[in-house]
Amino acid sequence: MATDQLSTIEFWSQPWEAREPLFAELRRNAPISWHEPPEDVLGVPAVEGDGYWAVVRYDDVRRISRDPRTFCSGQGVLFGDAPPEFLEATQSFLAMDAPRHTKLRGLVSSAFTPRQVRRIEDGIRANARKVVEEAAPAGGGDFVKLVAKRLPLMTISDMIGVPEADRERVVNTADVLVSLLDPEVLGDRVPVELLGEAIFTLHGFASELAAHREQHPGDDLMTALVQAEVDGEKLTHAEIAAFFVLLSVAGNDTTRHTTSHAMRALTTNPDARAYLLEDLEGRMPTAVEEFVRWATPVMTFRRTATRDVELHGTTVEAGQKVVMFYTSANRDEDAFADAHRFDVTRDPNHHVGFGGGGPHYCLGASLARTQLRSIFTELLTLLPDLEAGEPQLFPGGFINGVARMECSFTPRA
Ligand code: HEM
C-alpha cells in the first residue's frame, strides 16, 4: 500500500519536497489512516497487530494536543519504538501525564517564561555576535559546525550550568540520541549499542554535576533540580539525569536545525533576505515564526488513546497509537495561504512547530525565538552575502536534522 511508505526509513531519508506529495494526498483523502509500525532500528520486538494512526491535518493536530485526557503521553511519545530503559533515561516529563508531568515541568518552567528569557536576552545577543564574529574570517565551511550548532549549545549550557570544558562533549553525546541513523555517526556500530553508550555517558555526567551542585549551589537549573522536592521527596539522580538529557536534546537540536533550514531558505529566496535587511529589528520577530514553520525541526510526536474516540468517522480504540505529523500540519493548505511558499511576512502564523498547544507545548519556545532573532540579526548584518548549499539531512521521522551544509561568504577580519 502506497501510504505504508510512511513507516520506512527510505521515505524519511528524502528531502521534504519529496515527502510532501504523500502528505498532501493524505490531507486531502485520508486525514486519518492506519499504518504498520515504523521500521525498527533498535531491536524492539514487533507486537502482533501493532501499528499507528497517522494524523496529518492542522486542526486534528491541535485537537489531539489539547486533549491530553483522551490522547496521553505517558505511554511514549516517539514515532518509533525504543527500549523502555532508553525512554526512562531520556524522556523525563515529555513522556508523562498529569499530575506528575505538571509537577516536574513546574520545577524548571519559571526559567523559560518570556519574562525570564528577556532577562538573559543581552547575554544571548552577545553570544550570537561572538559566534558570527568567530566564523567571519573563515569565508565558508560547514554551516552547522561554524554557526548553527554553537548558540544553542552556549545558551542551554549556561542555563543548566554545564562547565565550559564539558560542553562540546555533552552536546556531541546528546547528538547521538537523535542521529543514530546517520552513517557517519553510526560507523560500523549497532545502533542500540551506541545509544546505550551515549546514555551511560550523559547520565554519568549529569550525576557528577548534580553531586557537585549539592555541595556547591549556583544560580542554574541543576541547582534548582537538586534542591527541588516533589510530593515531599527529592528527585533521584536518575530522574535528574533524564531531565538533563531531555533539556540537552530539546534545547540544542531543534534551534540548531531551524537555523540551518532557515539559512538555506534565505539563500534560495534572496528577496526575503533583502526585505529583512531593510528593517531587521522590526521584521525579524514575524520572520522567525516562518523559519520555525518552514523547518519544522520536530516532525512527529505520538500519543496513545485512553478511550475509544471518533476522528473523521474512524474509531480510534483505547490503547492505540496516534502519531501527529507536524511536518504535514505545517503545510496544510486549509490552515496556511500558499502553504508551500517561504513567506517571511506571513502574519498571523499559527504554526504547530512548537506543538499544537496543550500541556506539553514547547517549554523553550521563547528561548528558541530569542536565539533565532539574535543569530539571524548578526548573520544578515555581518555576513550579508552568506550562501548556504544543499543541506545533508539525517534520515529518520522524528527530527528534521541537517547533518552538514556547506556555506560560503566574503571573509571578514
Ligand atoms: C525551534 C526550536 C524548537 C522547536 C521547533 C521545538 C519543538 C517542540 C515540540 C514540537 C514539542 C512538543 C510539543 C507537544 O507535545 O505539544 C516540544 C517540547 C519541549 N521542548 Fe521544544 N522546541 C524548540 C526549542 C526548545 C528549546 C530551546 C528548549 C529548551 C530547553 C526546548 C525544550 C522543550 C521541552 C523541555 C519540551 C517538553 C515539554 C513538555 O513535555 O511539557 N525546546 N518542543
Image (tube, grey):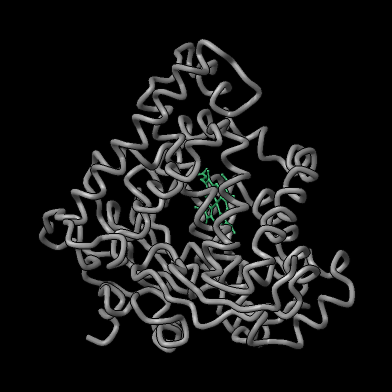
User: Is any part of residue 356 visible from this angle?
Assistant: no
x 59%, y 86%: residue:
340
Q: Is residue 67 left or right of residue 181?
A: right
Vertical placement of 16 versus 249: above or below?
Answer: below
Please state the horizontal and vertical placement of residue 244, each as a whole percent of the image. Answer: 46, 35
Residue most extreme to the front: 413
Q: Is residue 337 left or right of residue 249?
A: right
Q: Is residue 362 left or right of residue 210?
A: right
User: Is any part of residue 314 visible from this angle?
Assistant: yes
Please state the horizontal and vertical placement of residue 39, each as a whole percent of the image. Answer: 21, 68
Q: Nearer the viewer, residue 362 or 276?
A: 276
Please state the horizontal and vertical placement of residue 352, each as a whole percent of the image. Answer: 58, 64
Q: Which image quadrant: the C terminus?
A: bottom right
Q: Quadrant of residue 274?
A: bottom right
Q: Which image quadrant: the N terminus?
A: bottom left
Q: Nearer the viewer, residue 234 or 74?
A: 234
Count of numbered circles on the image: 0
x 54%, y 68%: residue:
296
Please state the horizontal and vertical placement of residue 37, each as a whole percent of the image. Answer: 22, 65
Q: Quadrant of residue 159?
A: top right
x 77%, y 45%: residue:
121
Vertical placement of 39 versus 366: above or below?
Answer: below
Q: Nearer the viewer, residue 135 or 263?
A: 135
Q: Quadrant of residue 156?
A: top right
